[in-house]
Amino acid sequence: MKYLVMVQGSQADYNAMNGKATPESPAWSEQDLRAMFAYMNSINDDLAESGEWVDGQGLVEPARTRFVTADSEGRPVVTDGPYGETQEVLAGYWVVDCASLDRVTEIAARVAQCPQPPGAPEYPVVIRPIDEAGGADIGAATT
């Protein structure tokens, strides 16, 4: 079964990774960033080697986000970022194809152990099964 494994962050975290401390997060050093990227790359390599890797990406900072909604007449309404400093957003993800929920939970637990500077906020790693049946299970979720 395929799963989406998501990591979260905020604009303050991206600022911290660019060396700008905030009340929410200390500034990251170049060594901190190298340790994080090396750790994440080792997870990617292991998933590729095991055949569980489908896709995975880190996302750019929330300040470069664009919202698109529709007004009451159906016209697009476009709003550029940034998000507020404390709002959590999707920072990166993996799509993995695993034999079980237990296995993807092991992967998420490993992701949660990624090195970061002391005092940096910790976010949960979120696991969502991917609906490969095209919504066939929606009714089962409500009964």
Image: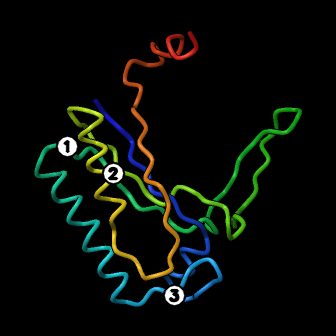
What crowding class fits label 2: few (fewer than 14 Cα within 10 Å), some (14-19), or many (20 or more)?
some
Badges 3 and 1: C-beta atoms under 8 Å apart?
Answer: no
Give the amino acid at mark 1.
Glu
Residue at image position (51%, 66%) is 60
Q: Nearer the viewer, residue 103 or 138?
A: 103
Q: Quadrant of the C terminus?
A: top right
What crowding class fits label 1: few (fewer than 14 Cα within 10 Å), some (14-19), or many (20 or more)?
some
The tag earlier along the polypeptide, 2 or 3, is: 3
Residue under label 1? 52
Give the amino acid at mark 2.
Ala
Give the amino acid at mark 3.
Ala
What crowding class fits label 3: few (fewer than 14 Cα within 10 Å), some (14-19), or many (20 or more)?
many
Q: Is residue 17 left or right of residue 44?
A: right
Residue under label 2? 108
The tag earlier along the polypeptide, 3 or 1, is: 3
Question: What's the distance in space between the residues labelled 2 and 3, CA to CA?
Answer: 25 Å
Residue under label 3? 27
Question: What's the distance in space between the residues labelled 3 and 1, CA to CA?
Answer: 34 Å
Q: Is residue 88 above or below residue 55?
A: below
Which of the 4 image quadrants contains residue 20?
bottom right
Residue at image position (72%, 66%) is 84
The tag earlier along the polypeptide, 1 or 2, is: 1
Of the two numbered discs 1 and 2 in the rendering, the one whose residue sits closer to the viewer: 2
Badges 2 and 3: C-beta atoms under 8 Å apart?
Answer: no
